[in-house]
Each structure stands twice: as C-alpha cells, then as structure tokens.
Image: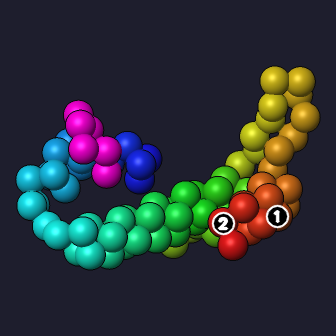
C-alpha cells in the first residue's frame, strides 16, 4: 500500500493527497516512514486481535476462529507468531 500511495501516478485518494503536498524528497521520505509505521502498527494489531491476543476497536477482547481453504484453523497463537516474525 505504501508503494501504491507514493507512486507518482497514484489514483488513490491518499496518493493524490501526498502528490498535492509538493514536498521535497527528504520530507517525502519522512512521510513515507510515518505512513509505513502507522500501517505496520495497524496491520499487526489487527492480526493480533484476530488471533485473540489483543482487542480490536474497543476494550473487550474477543476470540475469533479463522480457517484456511482446507479447514485448518489459523488462529490460536499461529497468527501472532507469524505476524511477530514478519513485522519485527
């Protein structure tokens, strides 16, 4: 998503806003790092919530069960382990 947002010809609303800022290369690099960090935090938190390790959108923590196409459960600690490895 970050690459899509920062593409010069991006047709996304976020990409068009970024292009409209007319900022220099150093500022754009910093903005890219900010957006990348925010998306990483959001995706990681969402994955932890789906795995039952954190709450999603509120104070109440809920357990979810996710299954792949073959019926294998993906939740119960597996997502958290992979997400941690991938994002950190």
Lateral position of residue 21 relative to residue 31, left or right: left
Instruction: Look at discs 1 and 2 and give the one toward the viewer.
Output: 2
Q: What residue does disc 2 label? A: 87
Looking at this rendering, what residue extends furthest in the top direction? 69
Circle 1 residues within 10 Å: few <14, some 14–19, many ≥20: few
Q: Position of residue 44 (x, y in %)?
A: 60, 63
Residue 77 is drawn in which quadrant? bottom right
Q: Is residue 57 visible?
A: no
Q: Is residue 66 magenta?
A: no
Q: Residue at x 66, y 66 (%)?
A: 87
Give the number of marks.
2
Lateral position of residue 78 relative to residue 55, left or right: right
Q: Please, is residue 49 above or below residue 19 in the view?
A: below
Q: Does the CB distance between marks 1 and 2 fall below 8 Å?
A: no
Residue 10 is drawn in which quadrant? top left
Lateral position of residue 23 relative to residue 25, left or right: left
Mark number for residue 81?
1
Q: Please, is residue 87 above or below residue 72 in the view?
A: below
How much space separates mark 1 and mark 2, taking CA atoms?
10 Å
Looking at this rendering, what residue extends furthest in the front direction? 25
Q: Residue at x 85, y 56 (%)?
A: 78
Secondary structure beneath dot 2 equals helix
Q: Which residues are magenta?
A: 6-11
Q: Position of residue 43 (x, y in %)?
A: 55, 58
Residue 25 is drawn in which quadrant? bottom left
Q: Position of residue 56 (x, y in %)?
A: 53, 61
């Amino acid at each position: 998503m970050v690459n899509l947002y920062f593409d010069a010809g991006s047709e996304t609303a976020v990409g068009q806003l970024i292009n409209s800022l007319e900022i220099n290369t150093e500022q754009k690099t910093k903005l890219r790092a900010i957006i990348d960090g925010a998306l990483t935090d959001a995706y990681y938190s969402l994955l932890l919530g789906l795995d039952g390790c954190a709450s999603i959108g509120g104070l109440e923590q809920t357990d979810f069960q996710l299954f792949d196409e073959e019926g294998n459960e993906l939740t119960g600690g597996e997502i958290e382990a992979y997400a941690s490895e991938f994002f950190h």
